[in-house]
Amino acid sequence: MNDRKVLVGLIGANIMKSLSPALHADAFVAAGIDGYYHLMDVDRLKGRTLPQLLDAAKAAGFAGTNVTFPFKQDVLALLDDVDREAAQIGAVNTVTIAEDGRTTGYNTDRRGFRRSFEEGLGRASAEAATVVLVGAGGAGHAVAFALMDLGVATLVLFDQDVSRARALMADLGAHYGPSRCRLAAGLEREIAAADGVVNATPVGMHGFPGNPVPVSALHARHWAADVIYTPIETAFIKAAAAKGARVLTGGGMCVHQAAEAFRLFVGLEPDITRMHRTFARALAARDAAMTELL
């Protein structure tokens, strides 16, 4: 252990079951750093706002903080600088804080989803494919750009808030041309005709029960991916697996985005294999604890 001390955290709602503290704690140990990852849950900290929590992190000497639902887009206006890739996506999930308090926003979700997809489903599953993306918020923006990186031919966008889907379509069109993305004409019909479907909404998380994807549209020829890992198997993932589809949970995305965030916070590359093992242990412990409460 060296004498380096690092304080980082996570700002969001419904985050008390997050596995990010476990991932970063073990990465700190591996790097010989005295570090701590602090959760700032607005569901627990009643009345606290995003600006207040970000200011508190700066005042406390945090090296940075992750940002999750519902703040990934709102945080942009509060930052001193935004990384080019995060600006392109229009969402930030990682904020570094310099010693003078200057903040810079990044998005590690894009790389996290892309690398998880390559590991779990293989890049060939996306190349030249038609994919339906459900959810056009902060996570949806990152996933959409990651799918473009992976070579998706046509990305079909759906969000209950049509204006959000239109905004994402415009952003993608500006970077990749208008021919590679469009709005869903009817979710069930679009999914039935597609190669794959991704849930990038919070629906399916503990606290946000349900399945935003019509089960009747799923078939064994599909692949199905979720960004959620709390629980690791959402209602959507279970339904897709029951239909015989290949599935990808949000676990790999969590690991890979955390690895990139750790690198930004401390300037060191973590051991991704060790992070996967840590995630599996922390997930098993969390699920066992939740089972005991039932």
Image (spheres, helix red, strand yellow):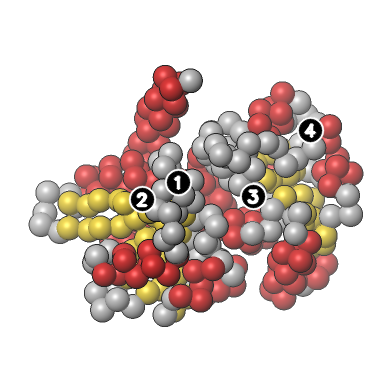
Q: Does the residue at mark 3 contact the one at mark 4 (Cβ under 8 Å)?
A: no
- Vertical position of residue 159 compared to residue 196: above or below: below
Q: CA distance from mark 3 to mark 4?
A: 16 Å
User: Quarter of the image holding residue 143?
Assistant: bottom right
Q: CA distance from mark 1 to mark 3?
A: 16 Å
State which tag comes first along the sequence, 2 or 3: 2
Mark carried by residue 215: 4
Considering depth in this image, is 29 or 50 the residue closer to the camera?
A: 50
Q: Which residue is mark 2?
A: 39
Point out the frontmost of discs 1 and 3: 1
Q: Residues within 10 Å of mark 1 (few under 14, many from 20)?
A: many
> Residue at position x 42%, y 70% from top?
51
Considering depth in this image, is 42 or 75 the residue closer to the camera?
A: 42
In the rendering, at what x and y percent does residue 132 appear? 76, 49
Q: CA distance from mark 4 to mark 2?
A: 34 Å
Point out the frontmost of discs 2 and 3: 2
User: Quarter of the image holding residue 219?
Assistant: top right
Relative to 294, is 148 on the left or the right? right
- Vertical position of residue 291 compared to residue 124: above or below: above
Q: Does the residue at mark 4 contact the one at mark 2 (Cβ under 8 Å)?
A: no
State which tag comes first along the sequence, 1 or 3: 1
Q: Does the residue at mark 1 contact the one at mark 4 (Cβ under 8 Å)?
A: no
Q: Does the residue at mark 2 contact the one at mark 1 (Cβ under 8 Å)?
A: yes
Relative to 203, is 35 on the left or the right? left
Q: CA distance from mark 2 to mark 1?
A: 7 Å
Q: Which residue is mark 3?
A: 200
Q: Which residue is mark 1?
A: 15
State which tag comes first along the sequence, 3 or 4: 3
SS for dot 1: loop
| Amino acid at circle 3 | Ala
In the rendering, at what x and y percent does residue 84 appear? 52, 75
